[in-house]
Amino acid sequence: MNLLKILGKVGASVLADVIPGGNTILNVVNGFLSDDDKLPTNATGAQIQDAISTMPVNLQAELMTKEFDVEITEIKEHTNVIKALGEVDSTGNSTRPEIAKMMATIVSFAVIVLVSVLAVAVYSSDKDTIKSIGEAWPLVVAILGTPTALLRMYFGLRTKEKQQKYQAVSNTQPSSNIVELIKSWKSK
């Protein structure tokens, strides 16, 4: 990725905070600047652009088109994160599974209580209770919604993590029948 694209991505943020290996890029830019104009390690994208704009045009063009291996560094950093997640999982940490277990228990308990009350009301022909429960559907949705949403989010995120771990370990993309079908259709 050339410096122009990198600075566009960084904007007014600190280069080293946004781009992995940002300090290396900053060192290259500082190599083109005089000692009085050197940028600090917490330079923003805007400060770097301002410093480059003071250079002669030929140096600006050379520096802005200079290619950096930002994508490779980003991939390595992401791989390190996935490895760290895998190491944490392998140590037996179980905070998220415990939270999911608690949410599943809450949902199960609420459903069992609701169905039991309805069953007793139907068995005893208590129309008022059945009507009251039917009118209280927003309350039932509110009670069941949060734990159910947490459960769905947990299992969705775990699936994405597993796909990323598979990619990191095998260095291949996980395949899907639908994706393969679309790829074959596009190739024709």
Image (cartoon, rainbow, N blue to C red):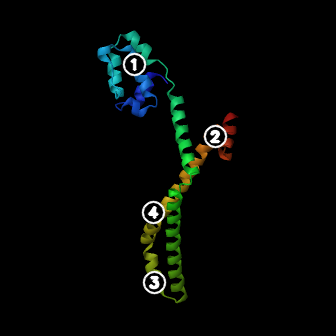
Amino acid type indicated by mark 1: Val
The earlier-in-sequence mark between 4 and 2 is 4
Dot 2 falls on a residue whose secondary structure is helix
Disc 3 marks which residue? Answer: 129
Please report the residue visible at 49 percent of the width from the left and 73 percent of the height from the top: 110
Amino acid type indicated by mark 3: Thr
Would you identify the image quadrant in which residue 75 lies? top right
Disc 2 marks which residue? Answer: 169
Please report the residue visible at 48 percent of the width from the left and 82 percent of the height from the top: 130
- Compare residues 136 and 153 and report the one nearer the observer: 153
The earlier-in-sequence mark between 4 and 1 is 1
Disc 4 marks which residue? Answer: 146
Q: CA distance from mark 1 to mark 2?
A: 36 Å
In percent of width and height, residue 174 lies at: 65, 43
Disc 1 marks which residue? Answer: 29
The earlier-in-sequence mark between 3 and 1 is 1
Amino acid type indicated by mark 4: Thr
Crowding at label 2, few (<14), some or many (≥20) Cα neighbours within 10 Å? few
Q: CA distance from mark 3 to mark 2?
A: 56 Å
Position of residue 164 relative to residue 188, above or below, is below
Dot 3 falls on a residue whose secondary structure is helix
